[in-house]
Amino acid sequence: MSTPALTRTGTTAGPATGTTAGPLTGTGILTRLALRRDRLTIPLWALVTGGLVASGAGSLEGVYGTAAERTEAAAAMTANSSMRALYGPVFDDSLGGLVAWRFGTFAAVLAAVASLIVVVRHTREEEETGRQEMLSAGAVGRRAPLTAALLAALVVNTAVALIVTAGLAGQGAAGALALGLALGGTGMVFAATAALAAQLTESARLAKGLTGAAVGLAFVLRAAGDSGGSPVLTWLSPIGWAENVRAFAGERWWVLLVIAAAALVQTAAAYALAGRRDVGASFLATRPGPAEGGLATAGALAWRLQRGALLGWSLGFLLGGLVFGGMVEGAADIVGDNAQARQIIERMGGRSALTDAFLATMVSLFGMVAALFAVGSVLRPHGEETSGRAEPLLANALGRIRWAAGHLLIAFGGSALILALSGIGLALSYGRDAGPVLGASLAQLPAVWTLAGLAVLLWGAAPRAATAAWGAAGLCLALGWIGPALDLPQAVLNLSPFGHLPKLPGPETAWTPVLALTALAAALVAAGLAGLRRRDMTG
């Protein structure tokens, strides 16, 4: 059977008949394949993102049960620049308006992250591993993989929109629909951004990094615009567009056209680029290394592969600490005299002074996000293994444990570094209690290392299930983020290792769970490395 020829129009010739495939030939099959591969992750992302917003009405009704309490809370939140930076302004004091304020921004971020993961997974990652080249040997159009990836992202965002609309319909059908469309539309904007990044870069990690940076920039622009009262900055952010749809507050339906236009323009650019490059190629070529290699050890190679990601996470955590540290002084204004709202923050941060509780909440959130870095860093050698790049290394005198050790050192040491930087940022911006704040940040490490150890165990003993470590980290993030607001039982919150850590800074420190989690992390790593030594390498 001959290899299909590449035509001048960027399509492939079918191997059996010699007929020319159109640019979208095979889209349906590739879409079904993408949905089958993500049959667990897509529903999970949709349920977590949509369920977060849909369940918000019940949780907020328990906190602000009367119209007077909601009016007072809305006025306090709008007057507090720190809260405007974190959540945005309150446009309406109805229950639906408070849900849109409290959960809308973060749900938009979740939809964006889900979209970029799905799109990059089924475009650049397929090319990087060589699977797309194999698929393209059949009658598959040049733009079919990109179309299938965007359709998969559309499924995620449509599900989010439907869940939000159905869950909040009781608060007002128009507002629920507007919020659902705003969140789903924001997800599609960043799905298109990811599609564009996948054409420009040669690696899936870089495509995810660029799109993730775009999401972070959008959040920062919205936060800066809302806290400083500058609408120009807010309108430069797609997350700010979702906010300005003003669900439950006199809906601005025309803003949805802005969101749709941004998604379509980026999609058109991605389609144009997809037809002008070969499979596996990119427009931003990787800089070639020196003629003579200078990486003498496996640790040096691991550092070379992961230093960019570590630098990006370090800068992000330092800046995040500086931003959130400036909000600490306004912590008391967040809840005023509302005892139930105070209880929610105390459940997240401990039953100490409210300022300490707010700081404990922030360091806990940094810890849960740091777990995502640790898991991704642990799974980097898994990607090297599945892509076939690890095999030439291990065919020489390099042992598996020494090869893995370099990556694990970056995963465990890097997570300590970024948490230390977040603590430094918090302390510098807060201006006091530098030691306790830094110590509270580093106290998150045992839980972070436990999730990283789980990733090592899955990769070493059951490599096909290695990506389940992302699900575990996401579940812990969801439990820590929305669990206290939904008043989940402590037994449920304790499913996350973060639920066992002492709430610092605070008057009391329980070292037993810290030591137990550290020992558990070490045991998981040891078991994972033992499995790695005994199993066959995958390719």
Image (cartoon, grey):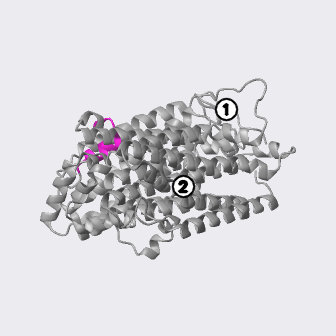
Residue 444 coordinates in the image, percent (x, y):
51, 58
Residue 5 coordinates in the image, percent (x, y):
70, 33
Q: Which residue is mark 1?
A: 6
Residue 489 coordinates in the image, percent (x, y):
40, 75
The front one of 30 and 317 is 317
Is residue 480 something one can see in this rendering?
Answer: yes
- Label located before the other in sequence (1 or 2): 1
Relative side of 426 to 140, left or right: left
Is residue 308 located in the magenta-colored stretch of the structure?
Answer: no
Query: Where does the magenta region start and end?
Result: 235-246
Is residue 236 located in the magenta-colored stretch of the structure?
Answer: yes
Q: Main secondary structure of the magenta part?
A: helix
Tag 1, which secondary structure? loop
The front one of 346 and 53 is 346
Q: Which residue is mark 2?
A: 371
Residue type beneath disc 1: Leu
Residue type beneath disc 2: Ala
**Mark 1 burial class by Cα count in 10 Å: few <14, some 14-19, many 20+:** few
Decide: is 520 above or below 231.
Answer: below
Relative side of 82 to 20, left or right: left
Cα distance between the residues tagged 1 and 2: 44 Å
Relative side of 242 to 120, left or right: left
